[in-house]
């Protein structure tokens, strides 16, 4: 088997023992399929925590780690980088220094020298790179370019923004927004979710035998011979819907645990029952 293509960020994280070689190969396979930045792929897959990854990147590249939660808006810096380029490359212009001769640029991948050179040429300024997480950069772009506040839980907004949330009123602490795969808002408050944990599951319209068969297929088995193309298509549709539901359920459980509406002990007990 041919060796997978190397990636500087991946090698750095393996060297820092944040991930191992097997996890790197898995993340690279997902990266080759869906694209994006490898650091984001690794955190989205749950292989390592975002802050651990970003700190390791900062230390391994000798680049300053900067939290973007409380940075002031710098119109001069924003004018140096078009918002479309910022969104495409996952970068954020933090500030201008030296009378506009130096641009401080936040990136999650400071090894992306092509992007650094591109920004330097467009901004006609020397670029000094600092490291920030992809989610912090996305939030900063929305806030400072678009004038919007992202609707997401505090675990996606960086450590400094989590500290900011402690200054909100008690009623605001239970506010969040969960969106399904179609972009529709599912729930807005923890209180709307917690009572439903004890409720009976809603029927999906699939017979128990079909559900058992689907579980077998998802567990690595294969569909028995003799199924018609229509039956195989229905099973495939159910499989896709189950995977979507699993992602939504996982997000809800993480939010409940984070907000303290459900403890890990209670969750484990209910899953065993």
Image: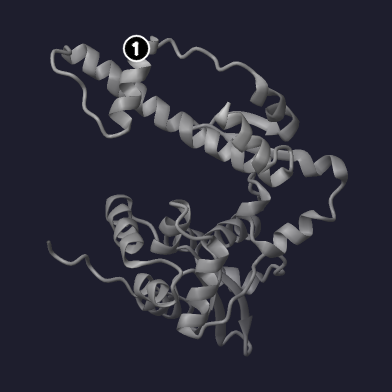
Asked whether, in this view, residue 77 is left or right of residue 91, the answer is right
Residue 50 figure quarter = bottom right
Asked whether, in this view, residue 234 is left or right of residue 98, the answer is left
Task: Name the outermost residue toward the bottom.
Answer: 98
Residue 183: image x %, image y %? 52, 33
Task: Name the outermost residue toward the right.
Answer: 169
The residue drawn where x is 64% and y is 44% is 151
Q: Secondary structure at mark 1?
A: helix
Asked whether, in this view, residue 100 is left or right of residue 41, the answer is right
- The answer to whether 152 is drawn above or below residue 118 in the figure is above
The residue drawn where x is 73% and y is 38% is 261
The residue drawn where x is 44% and y is 76% is 16
- The answer to whether 182 is drawn above or below residue 203 in the figure is below
Residue holding disc 1: 209
Residue 54: image x %, image y %? 52, 69
Residue 15: image x %, image y %? 39, 77
The residue drawn where x is 55% and y is 58% is 135
Graded by Cα atoms within 10 Å as few (under 14), some (14 to 19) or many (20 or more), the crowding at tag 1 reads few
Q: Nearer the viewer, residue 194 or 173?
A: 194
Q: Nearer the viewer, residue 214 or 182?
A: 214
Q: Quadrant of the N terminus?
A: bottom left
Please name the colour scheme applied to the rendered image: one colour
């Amino acid at each position: 088997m041919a060796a997978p293509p190397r990636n500087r960020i991946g090698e750095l994280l393996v060297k820092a023992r944040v991930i191992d070689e097997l996890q790197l190969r898995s993340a690279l396979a997902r990266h080759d399929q869906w694209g994006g930045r490898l650091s984001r792929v690794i955190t989205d897959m749950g292989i390592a925590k975002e802050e651990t990854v970003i700190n390791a990147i900062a230390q391994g590249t000798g680049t300053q780690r900067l939290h973007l939660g409380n940075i002031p808006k710098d119109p001069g810096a924003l004018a140096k980088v078009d918002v479309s380029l910022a969104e495409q490359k996952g970068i954020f212009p933090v500030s201008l220094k030296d009378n506009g001769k130096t641009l401080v640029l936040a990136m999650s991948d400071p090894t992306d020298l092509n992007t650094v050179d591109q920004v330097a040429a467009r901004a006609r300024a020397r670029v000094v790179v600092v490291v920030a997480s992809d989610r912090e950069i996305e939030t900063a772009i929305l806030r400072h370019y678009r004038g919007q506040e992202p609707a997401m839980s505090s675990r996606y907004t960086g450590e400094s923004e989590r500290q900011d949330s402690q200054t909100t009123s008690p009623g605001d602490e239970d506010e969040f927004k969960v969106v399904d795969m179609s972009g529709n808002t599912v729930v807005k408050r923890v209180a709307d979710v917690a009572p439903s944990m004890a409720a009976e599951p809603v029927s999906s319209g699939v017979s128990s035998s079909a559900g058992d068969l689907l579980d077998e297929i998802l567990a690595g088995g294969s569909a028995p011979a003799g199924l018609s193309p229509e039956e195989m298509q229905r099973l495939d549709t159910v499989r896709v819907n189950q995977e979507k539901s699993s992602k939504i359920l996982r997000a809800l459980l993480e939010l409940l645990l984070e907000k303290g509406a459900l403890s890990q002990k209670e969750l484990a007990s209910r899953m065993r029952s």
